[in-house]
Image (cartoon, grey):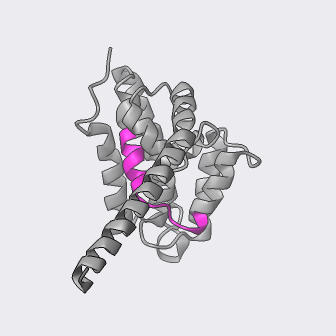
Amino acid sequence: MGADALERFARSLDAAIYRDAVDAYRDALAAVEAPAAGALGRATGIDDPALLARLAELGIRPETVAALTLIPLIEAAWADGVMDAKERDAVLAGAATSGIAPESASYRLLELWMIERPASELVVAWRDFIGALTGALTERECANLRKKVIGRAYAVANAAGGLLDTTPNVSLEERAVLEALDDAFDTPDVRGPRG
């Protein structure tokens, strides 16, 4: 057997071993995520298996789903690349008005997101979550949800204040984030509000 043939054999052996390991890992991960996705579906009322699986992959569980609703606040706070103390306080105030208790898993997750900006995939998942949620709401409920979510996000962006902290100010980066968050309520994924 020549050197090339041995090298091809070694590569195919590695690929076979690696493929088995990857398949085993995927199976184990699916075994853990399937019950999590099912529980998440029961907690949120979402029945889209792909969305539920993606949320489970991102670590969203029934006990942390409340934190997912605060992604707009987190995104507004991180829009300019830095979350200052006033923005942090505004995020925590938003958590409190959402009923997220300091001892909850959602609150702990929120604290992590205030230290390190969450992955962009989480914002995509939030957009899909909003699409699924608003598709099940009446037009009035959807409008109220939009007003509440975008209003809280705007309050966070506004929290840093303007010149000498005497006037509210929203940066261009924050405004772009707020507009993108607001657009989530108009995505094609939204089946259109009922009622």
Residue at 42% of width from left, 63% of height from top?
Answer: 18
Q: Which residues are magenta?
A: 114-128
- Please indicate, yes or no, whether residue 132 appears anywhere in the rendered image: yes
Q: Position of residue 167 (x, y in %)?
A: 48, 66
Residue at image location 48% in from the left, 45% down from the top = 27
Q: Which image quadrant is residue 194 in? A: top left
Image quadrant occupied by the N terminus: bottom left
Residue 110, image x, y percentages: 61, 54
Q: Determine if the magenta segment contains residue 115.
A: yes
Q: What residue sits 47% from the left and 71% below the top?
A: 162
Quadrant including the C terminus: top left
x then y, percent, for residue 181: 36, 49
Nearest the camera: 70 or 112?
112
Give the main secondary structure of the magenta stretch.
Answer: helix
Evaluate whether residue 157 shows in this view.
no
Q: Is residue 168 above or below residue 94?
A: below
Work out whether residue 117 or residue 140 is closer to the camera in this orientation and state it: 117
Is 97 left, or right, of 184 in this rendering? Answer: right
> In the rendering, at what x and y percent does residue 57 appear?
48, 48
